[in-house]
Amino acid sequence: MITINTIDNFSRPQSGFTLIELLTVVLLIAVIAGFAAFSLNADPHRTMETFAKRFTQQFELLTEESALSGNDYGLLIDEETYRYVVWFEERWHSPQDSDIAKVQNFPESITVDLFLEQESILSLLSETSLLQNSGDQDNIVEEIDPPQILILSSGEVTPFSLQLEGRGSEDVLKVEIDAFGRTTVERDE
């Protein structure tokens, strides 16, 4: 007679993973990879809207800061970057201890054009950087070009329009700011 000892088979610890566990891990990795791929290939339309919202919020915040602190600010814009500066001791300086002091890049998926009085300013700019160093190496002083946009403590602002266009698409978004700092964002048809 043959006897099968079933108790020994069940009491032995099992090693390895079950098929369900493996499939769950593979599914989680696929979902995470899908989200990563989606965020890397972001829609230019969504990128433009997100940037326009962030830019207008920064600008409105700085307009309020200017009125409350009594400082005059400026905005320098070129094809790839923008930067806020403050008027102090008869010249333009980088604001100290502030997130807005950094030169900020426009998103790579969009192109930008600045309009003052319906005329494109960025196309008129020669290839100059926002910053230049003085020739004296012992006493390096940051010289900042005059900004295209002024934000005065009296509440007045240089009216301008920032046109955002998706690279490889015909999508255009306009950020317009009037002389009182009121912002509007609209799609250009």
Image (cartoon, rainbow, N blue to C red):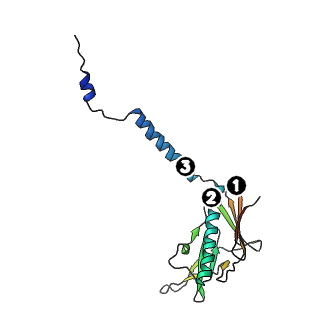
| Mark toward the viewer: 1 or 2 | 2
Disc 3 to disc 2, how far (Cα)? Answer: 15 Å
Quadrant for the C terminus, please.
bottom right
**CA separation, marks 1 and 2?**
13 Å
Which amino acid type is shown beneath numbered disc 1?
Ser
Q: Position of residue 177 (x, y in %)?
A: 70, 71
Of mark 1 and mark 2, the one earlier in the sequence is 2
Location of mark 1 (residue): 169
Label for residue 47?
2
Residue positioned 62% across, 81% down in the render: 67
Tell me the SS state at disc 1: loop
Q: Position of residue 180 (x, y in %)?
A: 71, 76
Q: Is residue 147 left or right of residue 16?
A: right
Residue 64 versus residue 52: which sits nearer the camera? 64
N-terminal-most mark, 3 or 2: 3
Q: Is residue 168 above or below residue 177?
A: above
Whether residue 170 sits left or right of residue 130 in the image: it is right
Using the rendered view, name the quadrant where residue 53 is placed.
bottom right
Nearer to the camera, 171 or 167: 171
Q: Residues within 10 Å of mark 1 (few under 14, many from 20)?
A: few
Q: Is residue 19 above or below residue 175?
A: above
Residue 18 can be seen, yes or no:
yes
Tell me the quarter of the picture where residue 24 sits: top left
Residue 146's x, y, as percent? 64, 81
User: What amino acid type should be assigned to the residue bearing mark 3?
Assistant: Ala
Q: Where is mark 3, residue-wise? A: 37
Task: Classify the position of the N terminus by image quarter.
Answer: top left
Above or below residue 33? Residue 163 is below
Which residue corresponds to the image point at 66% horizontal and 63% vertical from the top-left? Answer: 111
From this viewpoint, is residue 144 visible? Answer: no
